[in-house]
Image (cartoon, helix red, strand yellow):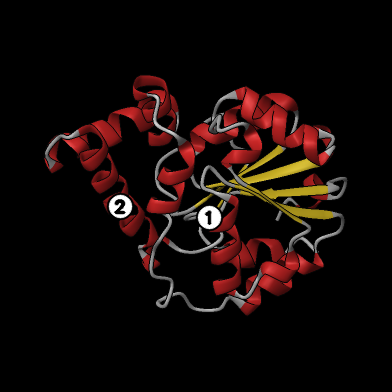
């Protein structure tokens, strides 16, 4: 375990969806269905076309919301409220993860392309909300999504972190490119398949175990 690589870290930044919890809970399936329904209703297109647009905007703009704002002038508030109105009853508390995060030295924060309220609800359902010093949603980035560099600049500026003394944990490798350029330690979370991109320092499919072995 490359513990030495993290000794100087003072700020630990975690993505939320499919990073702090396992994809097996399938929360994002619920979110994607609600995204598609919102696109369909708002743009007046059928479900198939709405799904195509949802995916296309995610690829081009980083999030479906960013695409809807850029292409159609959609207001972000109603969208975020609609797509994050999901059922969390199937979530299981994660005491091992809570303990591992709490043991990390320095500040621990969440930075998600979802809303701050979504981050609050999910971390509460996992029983890990008390482990974090701050929750940052897409609204804190001026509705600019990761992987856009301006999104990191806004959130990291608000947090006052030094990227050279920080680490970022993400399930989407695209979202680790800018942190890597800034000098952050980067960790890709999720099923380990294939070769990691050059901007990924470490990979794990067990976030709690990875963190527990650091400190």
Q: Quadrant of residue 64?
A: top left
Within-10-Å neighbours for mark 2: few <14, some 14–19, many 20+: some
Nearest the viewer among 88 and 23 is 88
On the image, the x and y values in percent for residue 76 come to 47, 38
Earlier residue among tags 1 and 2? 1
Q: Which corner quadrant holds the N terminus?
A: bottom right
Q: Is residue 199 visible?
A: no
Q: Is residue 107 above or below residue 65?
A: below
Q: Which residue is mark 1?
A: 19
The nearer-to-camera label among 1 and 2 is 2
Q: Secondary structure at mark 1?
A: loop
Within-10-Å neighbours for mark 1: few <14, some 14–19, many 20+: some
What residue appears at the point 30 percent right and 52 percent down from the top-left corner? 34
What residue appears at the point 62 percent right and 23 percent down from the top-left corner? 149
Q: Is residue 164 visible?
A: yes
Nearest the viewer among 167 and 25 is 25
Q: Which corner quadrant holds the C terminus?
A: bottom right
Q: Secondary structure at mark 2?
A: helix
What residue appears at the point 42 percent right and 27 percent down from the top-left corner? 69
Which disc is residue 156 wearing? none
Nearest the viewer among 189 and 90 is 90
Q: Is residue 16 left or right of residue 215?
A: left
Residues at marks 1 and 2 touching, judged by CB atoms closer than 8 Å: no
Q: Which residue is mark 2?
A: 34
Q: Quadrant of residue 159?
A: top right
On the image, the x and y values in percent for residue 124 come to 60, 71
Nearest the viewer among 10 and 152 is 152
Q: Is residue 29 left or right of residue 137?
A: left
On the image, the x and y values in percent for residue 68 come to 37, 29
On the image, the x and y values in percent for residue 125 come to 54, 73
What residue appears at the point 66 percent right and 39 percent down from the top-left corner? 140
């Amino acid at each position: 375990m490359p513990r030495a690589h993290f000794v100087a870290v003072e700020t630990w930044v975690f993505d939320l969806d499919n990073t702090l919890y396992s994809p097996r809970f399938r929360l994002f399936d619920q979110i994607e269905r609600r995204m598609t329904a919102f696109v369909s209703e708002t743009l007046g297109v059928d479900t198939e076309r709405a799904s195509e647009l949802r995916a296309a905007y995610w690829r081009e703009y980083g999030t479906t919301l960013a695409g809807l704002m850029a292409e159609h002038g959609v207001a972000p508030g109603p969208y975020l409220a609609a797509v994050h109105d999901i059922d969390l009853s199937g979530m299981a508390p994660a005491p091992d993860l809570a303990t591992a995060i709490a043991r990390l030295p320095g500040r621990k924060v969440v930075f998600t392309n979802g809303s701050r309220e979504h981050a609050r609800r999910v971390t509460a359902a996992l029983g890990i909300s008390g482990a974090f010093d701050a929750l940052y949603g897409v609204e804190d980035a001026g509705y600019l999504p990761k992987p856009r560099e301006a999104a990191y600049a806004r959130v990291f500026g608000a947090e006052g972190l030094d990227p050279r003394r920080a680490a970022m944990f993400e399930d989407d490798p695209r979202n680790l490119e800018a942190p890597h350029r800034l000098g952050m330690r980067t960790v890709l979370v999720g099923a380990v398949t294939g070769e990691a991109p050059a901007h990924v320092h470490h990979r794990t499919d067990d976030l709690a175990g990875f963190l527990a072995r650091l400190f």
